[in-house]
Amino acid sequence: MRAAVFVGVDEPLSVEKLTPTDPGPYDAVVRVGASGVCRSDLSLAHGHLPIPPPVILGHEGAGAVESVGSAVTRVQPGDRVIAAFVPACGRCFYCVRDRTHLCEHGMDGMMTAKATRDDGSALTAFSGLGTFADQMTVHESALVKVETDLPDEQLALIGCGVTTGVGAALNTARVEPGSIVAVIGCGGVGQSVIQGARIAGAARIIAVDPVELKRTAAVDFGATDLVDPADGDPVAQVQQLTGGRGADFGFEVLGRPETMNQAYAMTRRGGTTTIVGMPSWDAEVTFSAFGLFYDEKRLLGCVYGSAQVHRDFPRFVSLAENGRLDLGHMVSRRIALGEVNDAFRAMEAGEVIRSVITDPQR
Ligand code: NAD
Ligand code: ZN
């Protein structure tokens, strides 16, 4: 197999030929059709998560099941699947309470060797997936079968960015029809929050991003108002657009303490602020204690759009098939596996909404 491997903080990913470890009884081998390049992969490569190399990166992917272990019942060879970056075991405390995005087995896959190098050393895979590869060995609890004609490049996005963003709006924050929404950070995940807010029937969606390409794209995905932080304090700009009150729903989709404070500050009293961005593992954020009490805002964390993947992946596929969720325009660039480092550069340069690896063999 070929895979792009995190070998050290701030070093380029190394595209290597590896030997997959033998699948266990509950594993399926998946031929990866496409993999989106998400900011969380880049954050891991920058050392924002305390995960030791070598790690096969990639956690946003779709493909087809090639073979299954003897105990696998949930998928069969030939099935089209989207990989879930948090598995849904279906039996733990959280899964039985319909909170599968908090599944207690969420970290199991991260600890499992997925491949070896010629020297015998073992590699793990990000989220137990490792979609930056031409194949991956995945526990069946992290695979969702989908029946659709949508291309893999679109299904891959449902594996992380789309489910996180649309889910943040629909499941976590529960955006209400007619409400005012403000979204800070309009990359692949932020544009999905915008689409989720549009689907929920928000009256106004304010997109905040310093990059013009992102703001222009945001209009196509449903934004009604645009804020460029270069034009002055984004909190003041959002307040000006909302009669001085602020938005009913504020979203931070960047992962930085200062923009978390902005999202909170641009949410109106009694409104809901949702933190979608993934900060560095040791970052801290401070809020006014009096304000937490007095303004009665709801401050929500958000893992994986609070998604129940077996409910939500088919739901998002159906929305896309019926033209109500735009996955096609989320794909800015199609690349080969060997171009993944350039995709990281393009992400940092603000050139793309999503780069998608559509040729994992090259
Ligand atoms: P991205 O890099 O594509 O998007 C980030 C956007 O923020 C870019 O458009 C950038 O121009 C914009 N930005 C930069 N500085 C800004 C500022 N000061 N104000 C407003 N916008 C600014 O990243 P992405 O793939 O969309 O991911 C977004 C965040 O979501 C990351 O932190 C990622 O790790 C996180 N994430 C979280 C989950 C989850 O489960 N909660 C899942 C996936 C991704
Ligand atoms: Zn992601």
Image: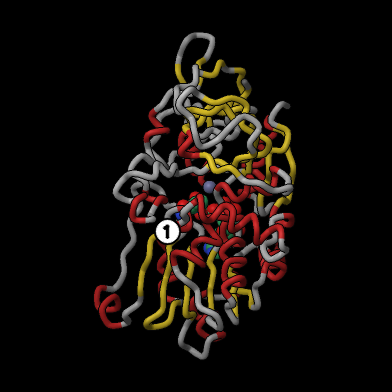
Total marks in image: 1
Q: Is residue 327 visible?
A: yes
Residue 143 location, x and y as percent?
A: 53, 39
Q: Quadrant of the C terminus?
A: top right
Is the CB atom of the residue marked by disc 1 within 8 angstroms of ligand 1's nearest atom? yes
Q: Position of residue 34 (x, y in %)?
A: 67, 39
The residue sitting at the bottom extreme is 243
Q: Is residue 23 above or below residue 120?
A: below
Label 1, on which residue?
302
Q: Quadrant of the N terminus?
A: top right
SS for dot 1: loop
Is residue 351 in view from this perspective? Answer: no
Residue 196: image quadrant is bottom right
253 vs 342, left or right, is left
Within 10 Å of the Cα at label 1, are there few (<14), some (14-19), or many (20+) other Cα atoms? many
Name the spot of residue 141 as percent of width and height, x first: 46, 38
Judge left or right: residue 271 versus residue 247: left
Amino acid marked by disc 1:
Cys
Q: Is residue 108 above or below residue 323?
A: above
